[in-house]
């Protein structure tokens, strides 16, 4: 009977969230993403699916309503699995199936998933729902809750994406990872930060100052909430705080990374350290302008290098034999990969775009540092690694440099949000490392020099005609495209280029790097033309830069 009542409720509620007939959407790189007007039924159905996933795993599941770095008019939804990671790929397939079932087939599609996964419908469910600051997020998160409503749910309201991942993990580890409240999150991270920065000597007020671009989004609100917990150990000047500007418009991590220029709204003094979050605060990039007014970007690759250098030095000093690797994607600047492999001698892995792929690869190591060049990433410690560090830190026979290194490693772990990339947590970690190493942003930038690069987008009729292999570094279809790219790349020194269909926008992305900016720009343009001609471009041939 219980089950029947539930299904009746689904039918009743789903009528309030009807699917536009014929609309087909895919669960992409980070969930569903499109114009907010097309998403009401998707949200309702993801509420249903999250409830099923919760019953199946007997654990709390998260649903985050956000379109992250995409424009304010867009929205989207990502599902969060029990340990705070992205939902497992088989369930992405269910998500697409459920999202695209026509209104009359919804119940059948739901039952199909219940059967395939042998879900016990009388099992209790718990779903955490969060949303970003987009105006559409209010009604869309209500639609999610309607989907969950037959069962139990917890609405966190406004949170950053990584905060929601964190809450889910805390809840499912019965508090072992932390307390599943906002206060718990701020307290854990800020106390760890304060503890860690005690190891920095002679830190001046200037060095404690950081300018933060909040992308006019949720990250800005949450940095404000965090500040009082930091006990003046970090002085933050916040701009693009959402009070006037539009979300992600001419600001935020994606804008800064792709445009290679400062966000609007920034008041930057020369040499000053600044960073940008994206619209749901799971990415961060740093930058400064030099005395000649030149802009210097420190992207996810530079962040990964800084963090892995810091950790590797400590591991050596502590005499700990733990295998550390850095996980990147095809977008990683060639100079960063060379530096990591040849100079630092760390293992480097390359995966497809999407933090879920990097996260899994990083889990294979004692310590896995993963960052996409766009600034999305974190550090994972295996249980065994955490235990080894803990034991050494507690060992009273260990002294001096070894002891200090072990204690530092131990205090580093709780600053990090290991569930997913987190701009706030990454910011605290980077700030702590710079303070401890007594390093300026210029010194950090000088670790290696980026190869000039360019990212472009090409509109095509159907981006699915592009198929890639080798972690998206080669195009296997359409025919002739990879050969065309190869011959264009050969024209330039130190050049590399690849193309891939975006999973969050209806475009094909083009990346090129080369010895000079002129070469990178012209290679990117020529590859865009090849995509346009061979993959069904629309809207006119791409113009040169
Ligand atoms: C999402 C993913 C990232 C990915 C980015 C761009 O970021 O979480 O892993 O790099 O989309 O993906 P694509 O090139 O496929 O459009 P976010 O910050 O928007 O959630």
Image: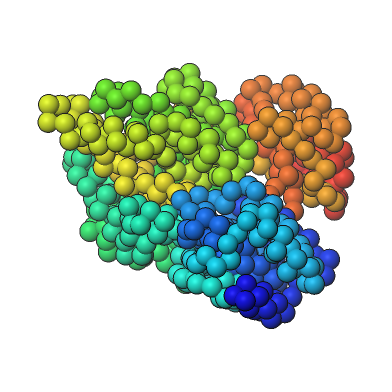
**What x and y, as percent, mark residue 238?**
40, 61
Left or right, 519 with reference to 325: right
**Residue 475's image quarter?**
top right
**What x and y, as percent, mark residue 40?**
67, 72
Q: Residue furthest front?
A: 1
Left or right, 431 with reference to 125: left
* Quadrant position of the N terminus in the picture: bottom right
Residue 192 seen in render: yes
**Residue 328's image quarter?**
top right
* Quadrant position of the C terminus in the picture: top right
Please determine whether, in this image, residue 62 is positioned above or below residue 145: above
Residue at 22% over, 31% down: 392
Please determine whether, in this image, residue 453 is positioned above or below residue 341: below
Of 204 and 119, which appears nearest the observer?
119
Residue at 53% over, 60% down: 54
Left or right, 465 with reference to 211: right
Residue at 53% over, 35% down: 361
Residue at 74% over, 35% down: 468
**What x and y, as percent, mark residue 394?**
17, 35
**What x and y, as percent, mark residue 206?**
27, 49
Of 301 and 172, which appears nearest the observer?
172
Of 355 and 35, which appears nearest the observer?
355
Of 129 and 330, which appears nearest the observer?
129
């Amino acid at each position: 009977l219980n089950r029947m009542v539930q299904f009746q409720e689904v039918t009743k509620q789903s009528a309030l969230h009807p699917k536009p007939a014929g609309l087909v959407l895919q669960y992409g790189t980070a969930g569903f993403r499109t114009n907010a007007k097309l998403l009401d039924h998707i949200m309702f159905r993801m509420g249903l699916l999250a409830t099923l996933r919760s019953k199946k795993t007997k654990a709390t599941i998260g649903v985050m309503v956000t379109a992250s770095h995409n424009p304010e008019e867009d929205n989207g939804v990502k599902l969060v699995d029990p340990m705070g990671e992205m939902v497992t790929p088989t369930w992405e397939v269910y998500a697409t199936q459920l999202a695209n079932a026509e209104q009359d087939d919804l119940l059948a599609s739901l039952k199909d998933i219940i059967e395939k996964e042998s879900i016990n419908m009388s099992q209790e469910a718990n779903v955490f729902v969060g949303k970003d600051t987009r105006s559409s997020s209010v009604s869309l998160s209500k639609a999610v809750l309607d989907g969950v409503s037959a069962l139990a749910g917890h609405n966190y309201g406004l949170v950053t994406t990584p905060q929601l991942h964190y809450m889910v993990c805390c809840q499912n580890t019965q508090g072992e990872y932390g307390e599943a409240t906002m206060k718990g999150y701020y307290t854990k991270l800020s106390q760890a930060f304060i503890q860690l920065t005690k190891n920095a000597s002679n830190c001046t007020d200037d060095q404690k100052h950081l300018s933060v671009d909040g992308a006019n989004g949720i990250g800005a609100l949450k940095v404000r909430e965090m500040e009082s917990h930091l006990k003046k150990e970090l002085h933050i000047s916040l701009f693009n705080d959402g009070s006037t500007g539009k979300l992600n418009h001419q600001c935020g991590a994606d804008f800064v990374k792709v445009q290679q220029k400062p966000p609007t709204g920034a008041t930057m003094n020369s040499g000053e350290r600044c960073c940008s979050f994206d619209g749901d605060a799971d990415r961060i990039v740093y930058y400064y302008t030099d005395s000649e007014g030149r802009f210097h970007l420190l992207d996810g690759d530079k962040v990964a290098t800084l963090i892995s250098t810091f950790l590797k030095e400590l591991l050596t000093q502590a005499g700990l034999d733990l295998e550390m690797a850095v996980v990147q994607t095809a977008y990683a600047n060639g100079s960063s990969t060379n530096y990591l492999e040849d100079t630092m001698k760390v293992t480097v892995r390359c995966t497809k775009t999407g933090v879920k792929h990097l996260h899994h690869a990083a889990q294979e190591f004692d310590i896995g540092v993963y960052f996409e060049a766009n600034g999305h990433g974190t550090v994972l410690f295996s249980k065994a690694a955490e235990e080894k560090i803990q034991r050494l830190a507690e060992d009273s026979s260990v002294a001096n440099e070894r002891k200090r290194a072990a204690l530092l490693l131990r205090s580093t772990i709780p600053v990090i949000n290991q569930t997913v990339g987190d701009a706030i947590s990454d910011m605290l970690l980077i700030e702590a490392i710079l303070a401890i190493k007594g390093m300026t942003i210029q010194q950090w930038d000088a670790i290696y020099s980026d190869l000039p690069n360019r990212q472009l987008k090409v509109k095509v009729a159907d981006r699915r005609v592009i198929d890639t292999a080798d972690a998206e570094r080669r195009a296997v279809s359409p025919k002739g495209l990879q050969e065309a790219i190869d011959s264009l790349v050969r024209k330039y020194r130190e050049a590399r280029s690849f193309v891939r269909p975006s999973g969050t926008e209806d475009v094909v992305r083009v990346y090129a790097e080369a010895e000079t900016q002129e070469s990178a720009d012209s290679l990117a343009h020529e590859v865009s033309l090849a995509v346009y001609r061979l993959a069904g471009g629309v809207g006119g041939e791409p113009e040169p830069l």
